[in-house]
Amino acid sequence: MQDIGQALSGLEMMYRIRFLEEKVTELRKQQIIQGSVHLCIGQEAIYAGSLQALRKGDQVFSTYRGHGWAMACGVPAHAIFAEMLGRETGVNQGRGGSAYFSAADWGFYGENSIVGAGAPIACGAALTNKITANGAVALTAFGDGAMNQGGVHEAMNFAAYLDLPVLFICENNVYSELTPIAETTKDPVLYKRAQAYGMRGVRIDGNDLEAVRACVAEQAALARAGKGPALIEMMTQRLVGHYYGDMQSYRPKGELTEAKKHEPLVRMRNLLLDNGVSLDELDDMEAACRQAIEKDAEQALSAPPTPTESVLKHLYA
């Protein structure tokens, strides 16, 4: 382990993301949060590690499974909760909900419920970065299923041809919604597709926070230096359903039990213990993160609901 402090910071962020998602699950179960919710439990290292490698001014465009990306960008948890609760203190005053919220002040340019649609939008940001020479990198994240969307292919071709400073992050959690990716494509090793576009491609362990941070840092540095885009396939597994209410009957028996042995929080916690960090310190961090998320949820719940008569405010067509 190269940097204990950075690893502790990464674990703290992963705890906060995990506990936020668990609280969202609780509120959705009580029907206090309404509508579609897609949770990222089990994929936290991708978000925490990537944002440790990026810098202020970079832009993040996530999938609809984006709560973790938003938190890693620095969006306050109470504002994320408030958005999903339809409160005026939400990042979009309660109008975006779980599937559409954004927070540009923190470099988080939002989720998108059109599968893969963030990729061409991120190319627009990257083109601006290149024209203005501002040194920023755009990062766009999507699932393995989105790799078969036409818009993603068009975005990669466009980015490679123009050497745009954009990173394409494929969160390969094995399932394209409810179907294994291996059953939808001839070759499920997705990073190899980068070669067809003439750009860099790599596959890494997305549950290894240090590997994520190192890879994103390397590829972002190359993009800033004018070396063009990269496709990073990050292997992981979600520990929950595709959406809230998904019974996961498609999973083989024992798969989740095995996945929980290798999930990012368990791995980083064990690594820190092996490198001399005390169990008490880690337990205290875990408890503090859980308590902070509970307070953020309480703050959001106490905020006034967005008035229904203002539904057309900020709506443009």
Image (tube, rainbow, N blue to C red):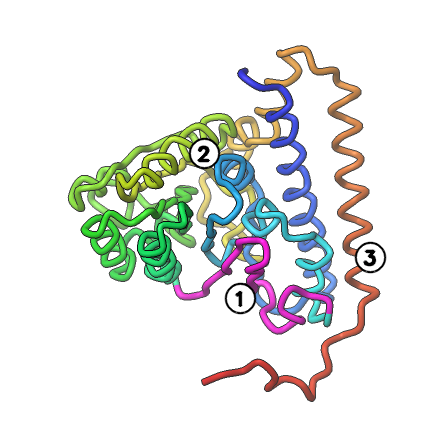
The first of marks 1 and 2 along the sequence is: 1
Q: Which x, y percent locates residue 99?
A: 54, 64
How far apart are the two marked residues, 2 and 3, measured between alpha carbons?
32 Å
Residue beneath the point at 46% across and 32% down: 212
Q: In which quarter of the image is residue 275?
A: top right
Task: Name the quarter where the N terminus is drawn.
Answer: top right
How far apart are the two marked residues, 1 and 2, measured between alpha carbons?
24 Å
Q: From the viewer's perspective, is 9 left or right of 295?
A: left
How far apart are the two marked residues, 1 and 3, measured between alpha carbons?
22 Å
* Residue indicated by mark 1: 100
Residue beneath the point at 53% across and 66% down: 100
Q: Give the range drawn in magenta.
A: 89-114
Task: Name the quarter where the C terminus is drawn.
Answer: bottom left
* Residue indicated by mark 2: 206
* Residue indicated by mark 3: 298
- SS class, disc 2: loop
Residue beneath the point at 38% across and 44% down: 169
Q: Which of 49 and 38 is in front in this view?
A: 49
- SS class, disc 3: helix
Mark 1: few/some/many CA within 10 Å (<14, 14-19, 20+): some
Q: Which x, y percent locates residue 272?
A: 63, 18
The first of marks 2 and 3 along the sequence is: 2
Q: Badges 1 and 2: C-beta atoms under 8 Å apart?
A: no
Q: What residue type is labelled 1?
A: Tyr
Q: Is the magenta stretch mostly helix, strand or loop?
A: loop
Q: How many marks?
A: 3
Q: Is residue 267 magenta?
A: no
Q: From the viewer's perspective, is 138 left or right of 247?
A: left
The first of marks 1 and 3 along the sequence is: 1
Q: Can residue 287 be seen in this view?
A: yes
